[in-house]
Image (cartoon, helix red, strand yellow):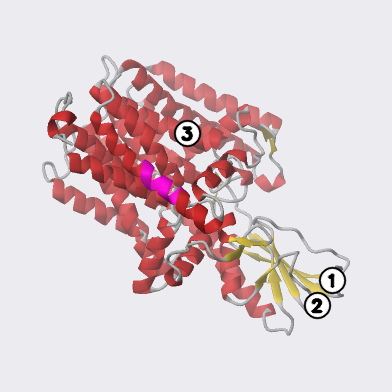
């Protein structure tokens, strides 16, 4: 494709940087940023495998021996054994990365988390490079992205989210600069990065329409550069065909069907679901959304406060959000209601800033960032089967960059915030985000500790040790030799033991007719902040309407039963 065909209007040069740190030293900034990311995440490299981590690890182990059949093995994840191709709703690129990293250092937790430092660093460096083109405070944009609770929490897992976002950021940066410089190779590599993002997590395919629209707005027509978006579309069609040959159906469309058809307790378009989506947006972005109120007149501050108070009082009075009833297990109702109001106001501020920017400044870059944010919100809130932090994560870099552009626009007669004030905001965001990530690590580690202690006590008593529940607890129980219960195939005999975790998924206590309660044991998880209990559901709103919650976090409880009589058929 000739250079002439790619020519189009070029944007004005970005404003002179307003940040005093390492001014004029781009390479030094990138090195410092990479070091900061590594320092922030190194304390979490011993974190136990958590939530969906085992699915990616198991696929990686299988790929190490059968690389052409990534999902050709059985797994018990929903309480009964199914082919992995029926269970997983993620593409295999992350598991291929896991297999490659394990070939060098093994499948241990520390080795895997160290390997996943790389995509986290790429996200932050890519955010900085993209922000250089789109705002005058690229370093602050990168630091705000790093210090969102959802980024730090997601970067301490071995799931596909940070990997997907790393390829997403690279693709967007290469596409923006490729259009600017009429570079065919940048556009081609950007197309490849889109495909790699989608093969890490299917949400990455939404970059195709997003960048297509950006190209049309930038060039004021359907430009020849858009032809490079055919490349990722062809790669995804090949993936759909290949998985259909392997597993009897294409996994790309299968995942899309699951995301839209799976039942949801809130309802797809209910006010409660939208409220939860706004709360997840505000909570997952953390302190950054406060920047949205910085350059505006008093009315938006009053509006945000009114929303926060109204939601707090409404939730506190009704003890519910939509169809979700807050019960005793949700802890202190007042705290849940207060943070529901605060996070909802935060989500509205961020979305409001995006919409206002698009309404008042109709340039292609503003629409790129605004639609990026609104698209992620729509997917997490309306389309996906569950609102969760992992679905909010893709908007974090766009939110940080757009907020920098928002304060640069400012308000008439009002000076922009000082870099010192913004730095203090970043510091507060870092404290919050590290605290949330640390609490999530405490929850993950408690399951590993529970598996080891329970197996040490009951695993050598003659009978088999069975368990219900999944996530990290399943990974460690199976690694120790315990068996996951499958009602269709499991056969129990007197003397066997059954472990049932309270805070887990797909659990059903065994019938009293042929079991007896032995004991209930408790393991501490985190202090002061909850991520998957106490009204919080960072990984799924099925566990609560907040991404994280504050208060006295209950201990994790495990009930042990002994098979006392032959099990009923």
> What is the magenta segment's predominant secondary structure?
helix
10 Å crowding of disc 2: few (<14), some (14-19), many (20+): some
Find disc 3 in the rendering and name its residue.
377
Residue 493 marker? 2
Is there a contact, CB below 8 Å, between mark 1 and mark 3?
A: no
* Residue 482 on image: x %, y %: 65, 74
In this picture, residue 533 sits left or right of residue 190 = right
| Structural distance between the alpha carbons of marks 2 and 3 | 50 Å
Sequence-wise first label, 2 or 3: 3
Sequence-wise first label, 1 or 2: 2
| Structural distance between the alpha carbons of marks 1 and 2 | 7 Å
As helix, strand or loop, the secondary structure at mark 3 comes to: helix
Q: Which residues are magenta?
A: 233-240
Is there a contact, CB below 8 Å, between mark 1 and mark 2?
A: yes
What is the count of numbered marks?
Answer: 3
Quadrant (top left, top right, bottom left, bottom right) of the N terminus: top left
């Amino acid at each position: 494709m000739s250079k002439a065909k790619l020519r189009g209007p070029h944007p004005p040069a970005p404003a002179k940087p307003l940040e005093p740190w390492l001014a004029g030293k781009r390479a030094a900034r990138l090195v410092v940023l990479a070091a900061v990311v590594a320092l922030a995440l190194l304390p979490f490299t011993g974190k136990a495998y958590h939530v969906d981590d085992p699915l990616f690890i198991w696929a990686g182990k299988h790929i190490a021996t059968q690389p052409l059949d990534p999902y050709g093995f059985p797994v018990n994840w929903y309480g009964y054994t199914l082919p992995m191709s029926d269970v997983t709703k993620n593409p295999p690129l992350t598991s291929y990365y896991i297999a490659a990293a394990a070939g060098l250092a093994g499948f241990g937790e520390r080795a895997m988390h160290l390997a996943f430092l790389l995509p986290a660093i790429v996200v932050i460096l890519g955010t900085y490079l993209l922000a250089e083109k789109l705002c005058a405070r690229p370093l602050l944009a990168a630091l705000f992205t790093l210090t969102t609770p959802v980024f730090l929490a997601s970067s301490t897992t071995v799931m596909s989210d940070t990997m997907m976002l790393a390829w997403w950021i690279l693709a967007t940066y290469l596409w923006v600069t490729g259009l600017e410089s009429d570079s065919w190779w940048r556009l081609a590599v950007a197309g490849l990065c889109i495909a790699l993002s989608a093969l890490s997590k299917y949400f990455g395919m939404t970059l195709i329409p997003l960048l297509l629209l950006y190209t049309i707005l930038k060039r004021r027509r359907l430009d020849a550069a858009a032809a490079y978006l055919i490349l990722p579309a062809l790669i995804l069609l090949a993936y759909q065909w290949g998985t259909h040959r392997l597993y009897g159906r294409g996994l790309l469309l299968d995942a899309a069907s699951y995301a839209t058809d799976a039942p949801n307790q809130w309802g797809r378009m209910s006010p409660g679901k939208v409220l939860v989506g706004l709360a997840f947006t505000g909570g997952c972005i953390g302190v950054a959304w406060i920047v949205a109120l910085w350059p505006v007149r008093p009315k938006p501050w009053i509006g945000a406060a009114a929303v926060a108070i109204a939601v707090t009082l409404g939730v506190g009075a009704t003890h519910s959000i939509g169809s979700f009833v807050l019960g005793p297990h949700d802890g202190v109702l007042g705290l849940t209601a207060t943070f529901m109001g605060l996070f909802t106001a935060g989500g509205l501020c961020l979305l409001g800033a995006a919409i206002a920017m698009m309404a008042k400044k109709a340039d292609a870059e503003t629409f790129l960032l605004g639609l990026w944010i609104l698209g992620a919100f729509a997917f997490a809130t309306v389309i996906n089967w569950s609102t969760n932090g992992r679905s909010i994560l893709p908007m974090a870099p766009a939110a940080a960059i757009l907020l920098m552009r928002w304060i640069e626009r400012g308000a008439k007669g009002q000076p922009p915030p000082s870099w010192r004030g913004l730095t203090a905001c970043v510091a507060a965001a870092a404290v919050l985000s590290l605290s949330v990530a640390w609490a999530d690590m405490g929850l993950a580690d408690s399951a590993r500790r529970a598996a080891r202690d329970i197996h040490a006590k009951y695993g050598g008593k003659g009978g088999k040790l069975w368990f219900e529940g999944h996530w990290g607890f399943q990974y460690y129980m199976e690694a120790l030799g315990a068996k996951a219960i499958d009602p269709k195939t499991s056969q129990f005999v007197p003397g066997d033991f059954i472990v049932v975790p309270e805070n887990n998924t797909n659990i059903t206590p065994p019938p009293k007719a042929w079991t007896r309660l032995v004991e209930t044991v408790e393991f501490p998880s985190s202090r002061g902040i909850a991520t998957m209990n106490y009204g919080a559901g960072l990984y799924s709103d099925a566990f609560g309407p907040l991404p994280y919650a504050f208060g006295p976090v209950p201990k994790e409880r495990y009930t042990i039963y002994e098979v006392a009589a032959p099990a009923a058929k």
